[in-house]
Structure formats: structure tokens, C-alpha cells
Amino acid sequence: MRVPTNLPFLCLSVAALVLGSPASRATADDPALAPAAAEGAPPEMPGMRRIFNGRDLAGWSGDERMWSVRDGVIRGETTAAVPAKGNTFLVWQEGTLRDFELRLSFRCTADNNSGIQYRSRHVTDGSAPNPWVVRGYQHEVRNERDFPNVAGFIYDEGGKRGRICLVGERARWADGAKQVDGTLVDQEAWSTLFRLDDWNDVVIVAEGTRLRHYLNDRLILDFTDDPALALREGVLALQLHAGRPMWAEFRDVRLRELPE
């Protein structure tokens, strides 16, 4: 039997695989870089207010060609014949949000994306491409499993910061940039957590400058905004995205205001 001339290298390689490289050991030894133990959503408390009646869009305002109620759920849909002129929204009319807990479920197509706007501004000065445009924090709604294009990240709709905080991050905005302090969920966990082509349950908790997103009873994002940039009050809305035809559905929309 011929002995490989690179045997010492092979032995070192095997040892590296067994023991782990310095980089992998550093990752394993750093709690901030490894996913934290799963943290569940807070239990639903008494006093949640149902803000969608399951029959019609009373209390909501949007383009009636695109928004309707079907089988007890809110359905937004764009088609080739009825496209969205810019992103358009279904805006809740019965109040504004400050500190709150919002619960609902969504499902959507994979051909485009949607969103849940909160603490946002309804643009009514005539500068928007349609009468139902809002700007502010958005909980992304998607039907995908591959990071980072998954449901739940915070997007700065109409703003300059883009994807403010990604799914899986415990982060804060400081000194003009995002600082990531920990990991809550990774690609492997997401693959089993997200229900592709099915209903997914969302909980959004906003308290002061701290925003938390939960999906299917697991904390997926924990973000604290810069007090100088944080949005503290605004409207709630649901999005239909411009572009390719799509649909998105929402049900069981419940809201509870929290003491500030």
C-alpha cells in the first residue's frame, strides 16, 4: 500500500475538523454569534380588540378594486388588468398606534411581497402616486424560506434606511448605523419555523423605541431604534406591492394598546 506523501497535512486537516478551526471555535465560544435559546411570544392577554370584523372593510380605507373580504379574511390582490400605481395600502381608520401589541395571521404568493405598516404616516399632501400611501416601519410579508429575503424584517418604507433590522437579529441603531448584539434565529431554524404556502402567525410588540417581531410563537427580531430617529406614533396599514400581480391575505387582526 502506498503511503500518501501528504499524510501530515491530512492528519492536521482531520484534527481541524474534529477540534474546529480557530474561527469556528471563536464562533461557538461567542454567545453573541450563536443563536440564542428560542424565546416564545407573550401569551395573549384579555382586552385584545378585534379591528377587522370578518365581514367587510368597515373601519379601513383602500382601493376597492384591490381590497376585499373573502371567506372571512382581508384579501388584497393586483392583476395585469388592475395593477397598483406604486405601492398601495389598506389603512386602518380608527386610531393611531403608539405603544401596542398587534396580532394577526397572513399568507401570500411567492411572486411579490407585502407588508404590515405601523407607526407610519399617511401621505395626504398629493405627492404620492395614489391616495393610500404610507411611510414608516414595515413588518415585511413574504412567502420565502431563504435568508435574508424572508418575512418579518423591519423595512423603512419610503425612508432612507432600507432594511433597518433583519430577521434573526437582536440589534440597535446607534451612531448612524445598526449594531448587532446577538442572533435569535438562523437559516436552519427558519426552514422549519416558517409555513410556506400557508398561514403564519405574527405578533408585533412596540414599546418606546424597542420593537419586537414574533413569528409562529417565536421571537425572530428584537430592535431598539435611536431615540432621535424612532417613530413613536402613526397609522396601521397593510400593503400591496407594485410590480408583478400578487395577492396577500390577513385574518384575526387584534390590537391592544400598552401603557407608555
Image (cartoon, grey):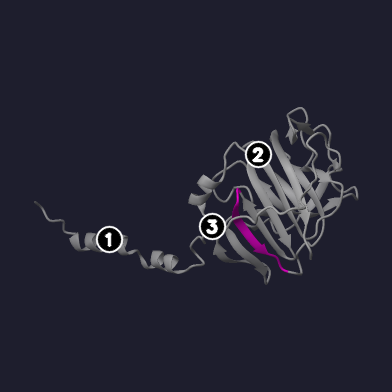
Label 2 sits on residue: 107
Q: Nearer the viewer, mark 1 or mark 3?
A: 3
Question: Label 1 vs label 2: CA separation?
Answer: 46 Å
For label 2, the SS is strand
Magenta-span inclusion, residue 224 = yes
Circle number at residue 38: 3
Mark 2 vs 3, N-terminal side:
3
Q: Residue at horizontal 69%, vertical 34%?
A: 246
Q: Which residues are magenta?
A: 216-226
What is the x, y in percent for residue 222? 63, 61
Q: Position of residue 196 (x, y in %)?
A: 57, 39
| Relative image position of residue 112 (x, y in whole percent) | 66, 39
Taking the spot 63% from the left edge, 53% from the top edge, the residue there is: 214
| Quadrant housing residue 111 | top right
How many tags in the picture? 3
Query: Taking the image as drawn, is residue 162 in sight?
Result: yes
State the CA–CA distance, disc 1 to disc 3.
Answer: 34 Å
Asked whether, in this view, residue 205 is left or right of residue 12, the answer is right
- Three-letter code, disc 2: Arg
Q: Residues within 10 Å of mark 3 (few under 14, many from 20)?
A: few
Query: Could you tell whether 177 is left or right of 118 in the image?
Result: left
> Label 3 amino acid?
Ala
Mark drawn on residue 216: none
Q: In the image, which is nearer the foreground, mark 1 or mark 2?
A: 2
What crowding class fits label 2: few (fewer than 14 Cα within 10 Å), some (14-19), or many (20 or more)?
many
230 or 54: nearer the viewer: 54
Q: CA distance from mark 2 to mark 3?
A: 23 Å
Residue assigned mark 1: 13
